[in-house]
């Protein structure tokens, strides 16, 4: 077991030693650890659910009160060539808050600032209304150039069940009328607590030659964007099938990076009902979205 380079920042540096310490302590006590990553994670979680000393090293705001352990089978899709940048940006070692703000084929824009914050607006992703700006600093925007070929490996992930594809492949393959899955952003209203949103492609995606405003949002030059029409969920039936209807709202332009990169588009079956057109998402299709789509980068 080893920690990869740049595995975390601030409090994560010290916390990364917890697993190693538990293994060493268990070995001296003669405790048995089950085989495999899951067995190791379970053992460590039982042995060290929280720090031995509360507020260790006077960490103040950064002091841990408990630990959360996770296992990512098959490396969880964390490959260097998915997020490999040519270089970072000056001063990145002093920043601890990073938020993806979308990317084009060859670069990515990040929202960055000195510290993270857990005030209500920040939890909702509304960083402009942060209540702790004097402490955590203002969010800045930087662009990172990706290495050529970055992201190719995404196409091979979740193989065998209709898993991932690349952003470039999605850009060229989408057609008018295709149904797609869109990630739920913290700033979006989600009264039904949906895991994802569904939308219908209204126009083939295009690359912006210059920055501009669409649907009240600003998009930067080089970004890949697409015009969509939302579906609204009506109900989840007893067998798990989900009923949707076409939204009565206007069309909207979104960043193509918000579309989940499934290897094939979503199948909806039309339903004969009065009023707005209704569609059925079969439970098997929902399971495919959750199993593969929620892992896509």
Image (cartoon, grey):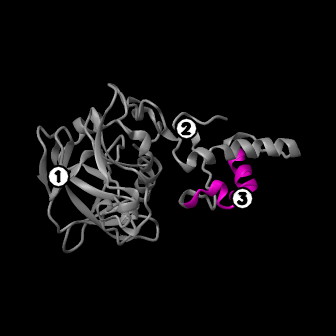
User: Which residue sits at x=34%, y=54%?
Assistant: 183
From the viewer's perspective, is the residue at label 2 or at label 1 nearer? Answer: 1
From the viewer's perspective, is the residue at label 3 or at label 2 nearer? Answer: 3
**Sequence-wise first label, 2 or 1:** 2
Would you say 275 lies left or right of 32 here? left
User: Which residue sits at x=55%, y=38%?
Assistant: 75
User: Which residue sits at x=27%, y=32%?
Assistant: 106
User: The C terminus is located in which quarter?
Assistant: top left
Q: Residues within 10 Å of mark 3 (few under 14, many from 20)?
A: few
Q: Quadrant of residue 205?
A: top left
Q: Residues within 10 Å of mark 1 (few under 14, many from 20)?
A: few
**Residue 145 drawn above or below residue 278:** above
Q: Residue furthest right?
A: 30
Mark number, residue 75: 2
Is there CB contact under 8 Å for labels 2 and 1?
Answer: no
Q: Position of residue 70 (x, y in %)?
A: 60, 50
What stretch of residues is rendered in magenta? 39-60
Q: Residues within 10 Å of mark 2 (few under 14, many from 20)?
A: few
User: Which residue sits at x=69%, y=45%?
Assistant: 19
**Sequence-wise first label, 3 or 2:** 3
Mark number, residue 65: none
Q: Residue furthest bottom?
A: 274
Queried whether the magenta region covers residue 28, the answer comes back as no
From the image, tell me which residue sits under label 3.
53
From the image, tell me which residue sits under label 1.
218
Secondary element at image label 3: loop
Q: Position of residue 295 (x, y in %)?
A: 45, 46
Secondary element at image label 2: helix
């Amino acid at each position: 077991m080893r920690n990869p380079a740049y595995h975390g920042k601030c409090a994560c540096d010290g916390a990364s030693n917890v697993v190693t310490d538990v293994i060493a302590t268990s070995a001296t006590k003669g405790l048995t650890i089950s085989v495999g990553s899951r067995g190791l994670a379970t053992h460590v979680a039982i042995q060290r659910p929280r720090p031995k000393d509360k507020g260790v090293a006077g960490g103040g705001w950064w002091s841990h009160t408990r630990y959360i352990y996770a296992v990512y089978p098959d490396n969880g899709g964390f490959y260097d060539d998915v997020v490999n940048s040519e270089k970072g940006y000056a001063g990145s070692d002093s920043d601890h808050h990073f938020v993806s703000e979308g990317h084009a084929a060859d670069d990515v824009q990040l929202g960055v600032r000195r510290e993270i914050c857990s005030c209500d607006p920040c939890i909702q992703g509304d960083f402009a209304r942060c209540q702790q700006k004097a402490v955590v600093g203002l969010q800045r925007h930087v662009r990172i150039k990706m290495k050529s070929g970055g992201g190719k490996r995404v196409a091979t992930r979740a193989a065998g069940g209709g898993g991932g594809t690349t952003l470039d492949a999605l850009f060229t393959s989408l057609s008018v009328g295709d149904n797609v899955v869109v990630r739920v952003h913290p700033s979006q209203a989600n009264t039904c607590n949906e895991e994802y949103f569904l939308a219908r492609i209204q126009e083939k995606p295009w690359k912006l030659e210059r920055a501009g405003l669409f649907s009240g949002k600003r998009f930067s030059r080089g970004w890949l964007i697409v015009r969509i029409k939302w579906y609204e969920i009506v109900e989840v039936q007893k067998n798990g099938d989900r009923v949707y209807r076409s939204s009565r709202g206007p069309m909207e332009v979104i960043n193509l990076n918000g579309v989940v990169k499934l290897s094939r588009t979503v199948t909806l079956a039309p339903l004969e009902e009065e009023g707005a057109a209704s569609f059925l998402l079969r439970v098997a299709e929902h399971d495919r979205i959750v199993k593969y789509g929620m892992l896509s980068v």
